[in-house]
Amino acid sequence: MSSYSAEQEDLLKRLRRIEGQVAGISRMVADDRYCIDVLTQVSAVTKALQSVSLKLLDAHLAGCVVEAARQGGPEADAKVKEASEAIARLVRS
């Protein structure tokens, strides 16, 4: 069971909405729509994906990382390092 299981349906709903937005962007490009309009939609999708990422990260920290920290040892260190690396990737993106 993943740490985001409780929010799985909400996450899937958000991801389906994002899929629709991306399909809409593809149609906009195919229809040769105005650049700024396309960029506005790309920005909206980017923000939506960031929101999903933050929800997943929050669940990981609250679940996997906290549980590993309670147990201590190398597993805890590995989970903290893994979370830190994930945060770094999100910040760079």
Image (spheres, rainbow, N blue to C red):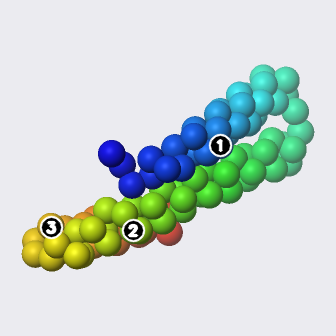
- Identify the residue shown where x is 59% and y is 57%: 50
Q: Quadrant of the N terminus?
A: top left
State the SS at label 1.
helix
Say what secondary structure mark 2 lies in.
Answer: helix
Q: Is residue 87 left or right of residue 74?
A: right
**Residue to which mark 2 is pinned:** 61
Residue 22's quadrant in the figure? Answer: top right
Callout 2 amino acid: Leu
In the rendering, which numbered label is found on residue 82?
none
Q: What type is the residue that disc 1 sits on? A: Arg
Height in image: 50 above or below 62?
Answer: above
Seen as rendered, the residue at the extreme left is: 73
Image coordinates of residue 29 in percent, x first then y, are 77, 30
Q: Residue at x 39, y 68 (%)?
A: 61
Q: Is residue 85 visible from the viewing direction of this image?
A: no
Q: Amino acid at mark 3?
A: Glu
Residue identifier under label 1: 14
Residue 39 point in image, percent of width and height: 78, 48
Dot 1 crowding, Cα within 10 Å, few <14, some 14–19, many 20+: some
- Residue visible at 48% across and 56% down? 56
